Amino acid sequence: MINRYPLWKNFLIAVLTLLGFIYALPNLYPPDYAVQISNRNADGNVSEEALIAATARLSKEGIEYFGAALGPNSGLIRFNDDQDQLKARDFVQLALFDFEEDYVVALNSAPTTPDWLSGLGAVPMKYGLDLRGGVHFLMEVDTESVILERLKGLEQEIKQLFRDPDNRIRYTGFVITDNKTLQISFGQESVESKALSLVRSKYPTYLVNGNPAAPEMTIELDLAQIREIEDFAVQQNVVAIRNRVNELGVAEPLVQRLGRSRIVVDLPGVQDTARAKNILGKVATLEFRMEASAEARNSSTDIYDYGDLEARLEKKVILRGDRVLDAQIGFDPESNLPQVNIRLDGSGGELMHRATRYNVGRRMAVVFIETKTRDRLVFENGIEQLVSEPYVTKKVISLATVQSALGVNFRITGLQSGEARELALLLRAGALAADMFIAEERTVGASLGEENIKLGAFSVMVGLGLVVLFMLFRYKVFGFAANLALGVNLVLIVAVMSSLSATLTLPGIAGIVLTVGMAVDANVLIFSRIKEELASGLPPQQAIHTGFERAFVTILDANITTLIVAVILYSIGTGPVKGFAVTLSIGILTSMFTAIMGTRSIINVIYGGRSVKGLAI
Amino acid sequence: MLNEIDFMGGRKVAAALSICFVLGSLVSLALNQLEWGLDFTGGTLVEVSFQNPVTPEKIRNTLSEEGFAGHVVQYFGSDREILIRIPPQAISSEMRGAKLGDKILSVLKISFEQDISLRRSEFVGPAVGKELTNQGGIGLLTALGVVLLYVAFRFQLKFAIGAVIALFHDVTITLGIFSMFRWDFDLTVLAALLAVIGYSLNDSIVVSDRIRENFRMMRKKKPLIIINTSLNQTLGRTLVTSFTTLLVLFTLLLLGGELISGFAVGLIIGVIVGTYSSIYVATNVLLLMNLSQEDMMVPVREGADQSDQLGG
């Protein structure tokens, strides 16, 4: 028994360790305080002139800066401290105000990774909001109402189908029930069966069922359809939020779908939450409807505010905001008067054409619908509770005469320039599928974030120091080997986190600290086993070999179960807790490598290949 | 084996003690319930930092005068940091989340006449909180279930039952202590609880592994003696690992800041209880179920075990 690793194995360990060090290295370079300039128009660039104007202003104000540079589509200016950075942002904003381009100026931190490292793809770890400060929102998309809207639309279509002279089906009632079913009742069974076959042939994708006990039928959306509607609604909101977040000038925003109907919005560095909410909270949609004719019955019309006046509109909705692709302010080439150009998607254009071709000369309205939240007092099990619920406001923002049959592109004219700008803005804001409201909101101040990093790093250091001392004291030379492995383990965790661009959070740091404590377990298991083998009379080399071998299965079983728990934690956890699960999982995997292979290799170097009388364990 | 400690000699006392603790915890959970944190209840939380020390009473009075109802005011880490919690039913929709934070900040600034800064504010809607509670419960149960399956597959059903009962024991007592002292139970504590499951399991598996091995090697001995020997053999490791883990956890508790203290406390309790349970609870259950040589004869994929070797 000589206890030596083959060359390739030592080589592998050395290479992995080296890679670990390289990819962990960027974290040692503290980022600079920086101000980032970007173009609000995502395709646009930041011009050289803009950067020069900004830096000139900073020099004039006596603010020290360095490393001003233009990147692919943004410019960065670096500062010595956060005070300068804060002042600089305002001045840069002022300096860029006169530019034709619309620039966004945001606080950011600029990495100072040396070129040779970034050339290797090595980047520093990302910090979570709890470490860098910022705002976190969880938006809930109201997919329920989208589905209800779809059913209402279906109701209108089917009513029309029944009224059609070819069919002439007499129904006695339409009800949309709570479980999202459209229920239609008839006078007699024979009508029901006629209706049933008609609807089935016209709507093959819906679940259409007759009621054997009564002259009734039900129409439901199937699960795939519901999912599709939800996906579309949430996706459109994600895109809309991304656009709105650009307005906020946030350096590295995160907008991400979570589960079926939620959207996570993380805005690092933002402290002015009220403004963030005002911009994000602009949840709105649109409805295009014809103005009701004078003789229309009241039951088929709605009355909404139109400025100081009122507008009486048909209940029937021609199309909604989700069909609106874009709305821009423009100028009529002949009269040079402002106008709003609207672009619809394909089916929107078709709907618009059908609605307007026989209605030239009538007026069409655009209804702007906003969703806000308010609380409602409810009694649940005798306890007073507030339940937040969305509520809806509706107003007419445009009432214009249809000049000709409209299609995919059309325009609203006869506006003042201020009006046109406002209308275009509202139309764009309403170009959304579904309403949403804030389900959760968290703000972390920048100072708290910095404090968390300091405390976290300090705990890791002290924890590591204590464990290292204890291991040296308890296991002597073997403890030294375990400590080396532990150090490498820490480096590897950081390297893996950095290159996976996993986000480090405060619980994540706690996970690293815990890993430091638990990672030595594998070594402790091995060393106790070696001691036992020595006690039972095995020669040292044999004891080392047997100790490592026997402990391996135990370590594997123990770590796999912990890994299972970590994965479950990851899947149920949100935000910060996920961070804990991530570092714990990574820590388990890297510690298996370092504690077993790494330690073995060091022990082999120290004791292997020679005759040994006793072990310092 | 020299100086063997007769762990199993005290097993009846230990069993009685465990049952008392678990029952006590259940009673405390039933009476006190858990002090659910904001993550679960919903509501608003604001942490502000004062330049000079203040007393919570004074802030309470100020807030009451300004018409805030149902608030909880407490120190958070130092006598200059104050945590204010407002339950969901006391907030009108105009004053939610960040807006509420700003409002409180301005009210305090006016009445205390010193520099006050907002450190963090949180708003959690009631629906999210409820979901989280469900998810947390589901998470714990899933973890227990998967562990049961894995251990049953790798070892044997009796070991799995022993391990899961030990986990249940640890989780219940940790929860019980949290409810008894009315400590805040937030998301980080839930994370700690799941980590406790991982940790305690680690211990149980190490012990089980040794018991299985000894059952194969010491065929003539009684189960009680085999288990006792196994516990003695693994005792060194159990204590050392618990010690290093507690070392880092206390570091975290003392140096890691207030935000992470609940997590550290949860794990510290869990590790202590878990260390005890891996010695007494899992093994006691094994004895109760009459673990015998025959159980070990069941093919436990022995071949696979033997071939799992690290080269060298």
Image (spheres, coloured by chain):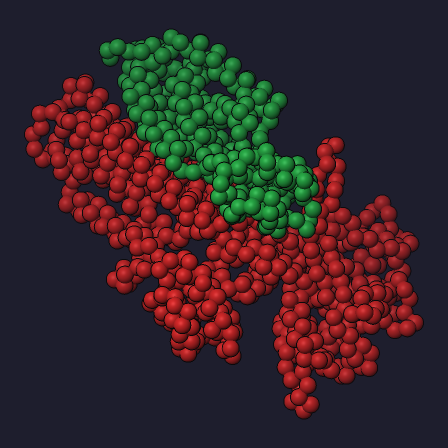
Chain colours: A red, B green
The one of A270 and A319 positioned closer to us in this rendering: A270
The image shows a total of numbered marks equal to 0
Query: Looking at the rendering, in which quadrant would you find the N terminus of chain A?
Result: top left
Residue A186: x and y, percent? 88, 54
- Look at 51% across and 74% down and name the residue there: A97
Front residue (pair A538, A456):
A456
Residue occupying the point 73% across, 75% down: A352
Please tell me whether residue A323 is drawn above or below residue B141 in the rendered image. below
Q: What percent of the width, then of the height, locates residue A290?
A: 80, 72
Residue in the foreground of this view, choosing between B127 and A300 = B127
Q: Quadrant of residue B6?
A: top left
Q: Residue furthest front?
A: B113
Asked where in the image residue A73 lies, by quadrant, the reply is bottom left
**Location of residue A240 (image quadrant):** bottom right
Above or below for B75 versus A23: above
Q: Is there any visible trace of residue A276 in the rendered image?
A: yes
Is residue B310 something that shows in the picture?
A: no
Position of residue A328 in the picture relative to residue A256 (left or right) = right
- Residue at 80 percent across and 57 percent down: it is A196
- Judge left or right: residue A317 versus residue B103: right
Image-based side of A486 in relation to B59, left or right = left
Q: In the image, residue B10 lies at what x, y percent?
A: 40, 9
Instruction: List the single residue furthest toward the bottom.
Output: A334
Q: Nearer the viewer, residue A140 or B223?
A: A140
Q: Work out which quarter of the rendered image holds the C terminus of chain A and state it.
A: top left
Asked if A38 appears above or below A130 in the picture, the reply is below
